[in-house]
Image (spheres, coloured by chain):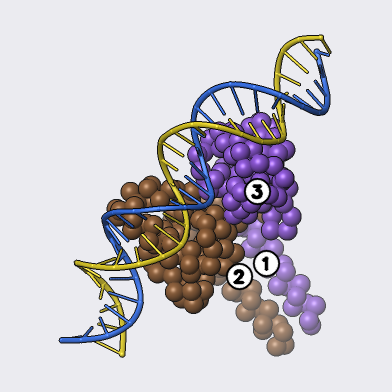
Chain colours: A brown, B purple, C blue, D yellow
Amino acid sequence: MLLYGVSLAGLLFLMRWLEFRLLVMSHATELYVAAIAVVFLVLGIWLAKQLTKPKTVLVEKTVYVSPSDEFIRNEKVLEELGISKRELEVLELIALGLSNNEIAGRLFVSLNTVKTHSSKLFEKLDVNRRTQAVEAAKRLGIIPL
Amino acid sequence: MLLYGVSLAGLLFLMRWLEFRLLVMSHATELYVAAIAVVFLVLGIWLAKQLTKPKTVLVEKTVYVSPSDEFIRNEKVLEELGISKRELEVLELIALGLSNNEIAGRLFVSLNTVKTHSSKLFEKLDVNRRTQAVEAAKRLGIIPL
DNA sequence: TGAAAAATCACCCGAAAGTATGAGTATCAA
DNA sequence: TTGATACTCATACTTTCGGGTGATTTTTCA
């Protein structure tokens, strides 16, 4: 008897619902159609996304990595050796292969000043040639390899 | 009693459904809606296909100019520039920070010979200083970084 | 504010580096 | 054998480098 009641209730609900559908269809057709359209549009998109294998395009890019891209200066060594800012600048330009004259021009100082800086630099790096200075500095992590 | 209830319910539902179908048929709305649904389903699929950007997978092929493990000399460049064996030896010693005199001593040749070699070397590397030569050579993969 | 450190510049001198030119020897391929 | 190339060495000259010394000016910092 209980089951019967429940069934009847469900049936009534279903009828009500169908009736509602009917009502909507007869009175608000545009809305309904639009809803259907949207629902199926989304369904279509979803279906397409599910069913189509992702189009994959492989693009190969050759990257040349220079070992000097993540250079971290060893400040500790700099401090220990007592190398000043200016001296470091000179050192970097020396490492680039510039002559003292070119360095002087680039730093807007006289040739003599550059010589003084480089001399002190050599003393601190314990070398006596600019090429050795570059070697030593790279080894010590003062300038990038 | 249970069976009777269910049968009755089913019967009622069937009648309602037939009635509904009939109604739909007579108004032809369902067909229209179905058509809309199909159209928009297809439209959705089409849209999805159009809008899905091809998934681009960028594969970065990393080529180390000079891997930290082992140095491979770029023989090609050597040949292109016409750098001889002896000149290369001089170049390597220059890169080590040796003076022309030291190089002469190590290679058992005269200072003048070393000068000749280095001069030709500079010419081939298109530089005019030993420090620049070292820079250029390292960049070209002629000597290890 | 005053001492220390850094940066600037100058002059001298010898050593090293680099340029120019020429030339002898050895090797290898055509 | 000859021509090309690499290697060797020399002389002469110019430029650059590096060491030494000293000085002035800035900057930094206690």
State the separation of the CA atoms marked 1 and 3: 107 Å
Q: Which residue is mark 1?
A: B13
State the residue in front, B8 or B30.
B30
Secondary element under disc 2, as helix, strand or loop, is: helix
State the separation of the CA atoms marked 2 and 3: 102 Å
Q: Amino acid at mark 2?
A: Leu
Can residue A36 be seen by looking at this rendering? no
State the residue in front, B8 or B55.
B55
| Spot occupied by residue B112 in the image (x, y as percentages of width and height) | 61, 38
- Mark 1 against mark 3, which lies toward the viewer? 3
Q: Is residue B52 left or right of residue B1?
A: left
The quadrant holding residue A58 is: top right
- Mark 1 against mark 2, which lies toward the viewer? 2
Is residue B93 positioned above or below C27 on the image?
A: below
Query: Marks 2 and 1: in contact by CB < 8 Å?
Result: yes
Is residue D17 positioned above or below B121 on the image?
A: below
Can residue A87 be seen by looking at this rendering? yes
Query: Marks 3 and 1: in contact by CB < 8 Å?
Result: no
Secondary element under disc 3, as helix, strand or loop, is: helix
Which numbered dot is residue B103? 3
Residue drawn at the location 56% of the way across and 58% of the way down: A132
Q: Which callout, 1 or 3, points at the residue further toward the start of the chain?
A: 1
Q: Amino acid at mark 3?
A: Ile
Q: Which residue is mark 2?
A: A14
| Spot occupied by residue A133 in the image (x, y as percentages of width and height) | 53, 60
